Image: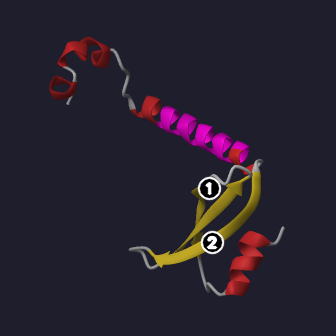
Amino acid sequence: MYNVLCPDRKQLFANVSISRNTVADRVCEMATDLKIQLIEKGKKFVAYSVAVDETIDTTDTAQLAIFICGLDSDLFSVEEILDIKSMHGTTTGKDLFEKYVRV
């Protein structure tokens, strides 16, 4: 890929470690950074809403996607996925509330 996109930087790519552990560590670091960014943006929200969407995966397990939409004082809107949860058993509104909303 680097031969096509940037052949002059071949050595830079050759020095990058892409072992399984390195990749996993970097993905975790990026996920943590994204979480921190969303928390910081969320502190500035003057209004927000939460939405959920349910789908069934290939193993016939319900997957619940939880989204947030927020608006800050400059009217900048943010829409992000907060989490994906597996739902086992029934998936009524009461189940959602008891498992994921009520503290």
The residue tagged 1 is 77
Residue 51, label in figure = 2
Which quarter of the picture shows residue 46?
bottom right
Determine whether 33 is above or below 55 in the image.
above
Q: How many marks?
A: 2
The structure residue drawn at horizontal position 16% and vertical position 24%, both measured from the top left corner, is 3
Determine whether 71 is above or below 102 in the image.
above
Please tell me whether mark 1 sits on a helix, a strand or a loop: strand
On the picture, is 9 further left or further right than 49? Answer: left
Contact check, label 1 and label 2, Cβ < 8 Å: no
Asked if residue 39 is among those painted magenta in the image, a careful observer would answer: yes
Which quarter of the picture shows residue 23?
top left
Amino acid at circle 1: Ser
On the picture, is 30 further left or further right than 43? Answer: left
- Tell me the crowding category of disc 1: few under 14, some 14 to 19, or many 20 or more residues within 10 angstroms, Cα based: some
Determine whether 67 is above or below 38 in the image.
below
Identity of the residue furthest to the front in this view = 74
Residue 61, label in figure = none
CA separation in Å, label 1 and label 2? 15 Å
Principal SS element in the magenta part?
A: helix
The quadrant of the picture occupied by the N terminus is: top left
Identity of the residue furthest to the left in this view = 4
Q: Foreground mark, 1 or 2?
A: 1
The quadrant of the picture occupied by the C terminus is: bottom right
The x and y percentages for residue 10 are: 23, 16
The x and y percentages for residue 33 are: 61, 37
Amino acid at circle 2: Ala
The structure residue drawn at horizontal position 75% and vertical position 62%, both measured from the top left corner, is 47
Asked if residue 25 is among those painted magenta in the image, a careful observer would answer: yes
The structure residue drawn at horizontal position 49% and vertical position 32%, both measured from the top left corner, is 26
* Range of magenta residues: 24-40
